[in-house]
C-alpha cells in the first residue's frame, strides 16, 4: 500500500494503474476507521481492480468548531487498518492542499432542507464540495458510501446525476456492533451508560419495522412509536429529529411512499448519533435496517 498527501503524486500513481487497464474504486473517509469503513473497502475491491481511500477531516462540513476539534484523529491506526483491508492507495491531504482561499463550492438544493441538513447548516455544501474535489482528483470508476449517512448518499447521487460526474455510486449496508449499535467514528465518545442508552435508536427502528410488518403504514403513528420507544428506553439528552421522509425528495411525507426513510438523530451526552431504515413498498413491504 502506498500513501501520499500530494495531489500530483496521487494522480501519477492512479494514471499508471489506469494505463494497465485497471478500474479504480474510491472510498472517501474522515479516518478513525472502523468495520463500517472496511466494508466499503470490501465492496470497492469486489467491484474494481484498484482501491483508493481518502482520509481527510473536512473542516468545511463541520458547522460546530467544537465537533471538528474533537473529531477522532488516529492516522497510524488508520493506515494499518487500510493496509490490512487491502486498500492500494491512501490519499492523506492536509488543509493547505485541499483549500487555498477557496471561492468555488458545490451545493445541492432542496434535498438538504430536512433531517441533518436542517440541523447542520452548510454541512452538505461542505460534503458536496469535498466529494466533488475528490472525484476530480481521483477520477474513480465507482465510489462507495454507507447507508448510515442516508441523506449524504441521496444528495451525492443527485449531485453525480446533475453534474454528470462519470462515476457510479455504490451504497453499502449499515454495519452494526453485535448489540445493534451502528458503527460510527463518534461512538468512542460515548460513556458505557450513554452507549447502553444509545441502543434504543436501533431498537426503536426494529420496533417500528415490526409494526410495519404487522400492517401499520401511517408515518405519524410510526414516528410517535419510535419517539416513545427512544424516550422510554434511552432517555436521550435531546432528539434532533425522528422523521419519515420520501426517499426521493427527503421531505417529510404523511403517507408511505414507494421508497421511504425513517431517520433518527439524537444526542447521548454530547455525542450526536444517527441511524435509519429504508422502507420499500412494492408487492411486499421490506425494511432495510
Ligand atoms: O461520510 C464521511 O465520512 C464524509 O462526509 C465524507 C464523505 C468522507 C466527506 O468528507
Image (cartoon, rainbow, N blue to C red):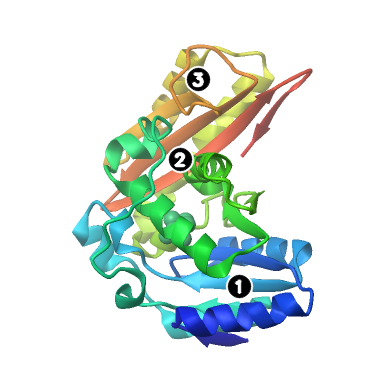
Residue at which label 3 appears: 222
Mark 1 vs mark 2: which is more N-terminal? Answer: 1
Look at the numbered discs 1 and 2 and tell me whether their residues touch, using CB distance below 8 Å.
no
> Which percent across, then down, holds residue 147?
57, 46
Spatial CA span between label 2 and label 3: 15 Å
Residue at which label 2 appears: 200
80 over 131 or under it: above or below: below
| Image position of 218 (left or right of 126) | right
Mark 2 vs mark 3: which is more N-terminal? Answer: 2
Q: Nearer the viewer, residue 21 or 225?
A: 21
Residue 234: in sight, yes or no? no
In front: mark 2 or mark 3? 3
> Pointer 2: residues within 10 angstroms few (<14), some, or many (20+)?
many
67 over 241 or under it: above or below: below
| Image position of 61 (left or right of 56) | left
In front: mark 3 or mark 1? 1
The C terminus lies in quadrant = top right
> Which percent across, then down, holds residue 156?
51, 46
Spatial CA span between label 1 and label 2: 35 Å
The quarter of the displayed image where residue 84 is located: bottom right
> Looking at the image, how many numbered discs can be counted on the residues?
3
The N terminus lies in quadrant = bottom right
Q: Which residue is drawn at 43% across and 81% down?
A: 75
Q: Residue at x 52, y 44 (%)?
A: 163
> Which percent across, then down, holds residue 110?
39, 29
| Element under disc 1 | strand
Residue at which label 1 appears: 52
Amino acid at each position: 500500500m502506498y500513501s501520499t498527501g500530494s495531489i500530483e503524486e496521487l494522480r501519477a500513481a492512479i494514471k499508471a494503474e489506469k494505463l494497465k487497464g485497471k478500474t479504480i474504486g474510491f472510498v472517501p473517509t474522515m479516518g478513525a476507521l472502523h468495520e463500517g469503513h472496511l466494508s466499503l473497502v470490501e465492496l470497492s475491491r469486489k467491484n474494481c481492480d484498484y482501491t483508493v481511500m481518502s482520509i481527510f477531516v473536512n473542516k468545511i462540513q463541520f458547522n460546530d468548531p467544537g465537533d471538528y476539534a474533537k473529531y477522532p484523529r488516529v492516522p497510524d491506526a488508520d493506515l494499518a487498518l487500510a493496509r490490512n483491508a487491502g486498500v492500494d492507495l491512501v490519499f492523506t491531504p492536509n488543509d493547505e492542499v485541499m483549500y487555498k482561499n477557496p471561492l468555488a463550492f458545490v451545493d445541492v438544493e432542496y434535498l438538504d432542507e430536512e433531517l441533518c441538513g436542517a440541523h447542520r447548516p452548510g454541512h452538505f455544501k461542505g460534503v458536496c464540495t469535498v466529494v466533488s474535489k475528490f472525484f476530480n482528483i481521483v477520477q474513480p470508476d465507482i465510489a462507495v458510501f454507507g447507508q448510515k449517512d442516508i441523506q449524504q448518499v441521496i444528495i451525492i447521487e443527485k449531485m453525480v446525476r446533475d453534474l454528470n460526474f462519470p462515476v457510479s455510486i455504490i451504497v453499502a449496508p449499515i454495519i452494526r456492533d453485535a448489540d445493534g449499535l451502528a458503527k460510527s467514528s463518534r461512538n468512542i465518545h460515548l460513556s458505557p451508560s450513554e452507549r447502553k442508552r444509545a441502543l434504543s435508536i436501533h431498537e426503536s427502528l426494529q420496533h417500528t419495522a415490526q409494526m410495519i410488518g404487522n400492517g401499520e403504514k401511517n408515518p405519524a403513528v410510526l414516528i410517535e412509536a419510535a419517539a416513545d420507544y427512544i424516550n422510554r428506553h434511552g432517555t436521550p439528552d435531546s432528539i434532533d429529529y425522528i422523521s419519515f421522509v420520501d426517499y426521493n425528495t427527503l421531505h417529510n411525507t404523511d403517507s408511505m411512499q414507494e421508497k421511504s426513510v425513517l431517520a433518527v438523530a439524537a444526542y447521548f451526552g454530547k455525542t450526536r448519533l444517527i441511524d435509519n431504515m429504508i422502507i420499500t413498498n412494492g408487492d411486499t413491504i421490506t425494511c432495510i435496517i
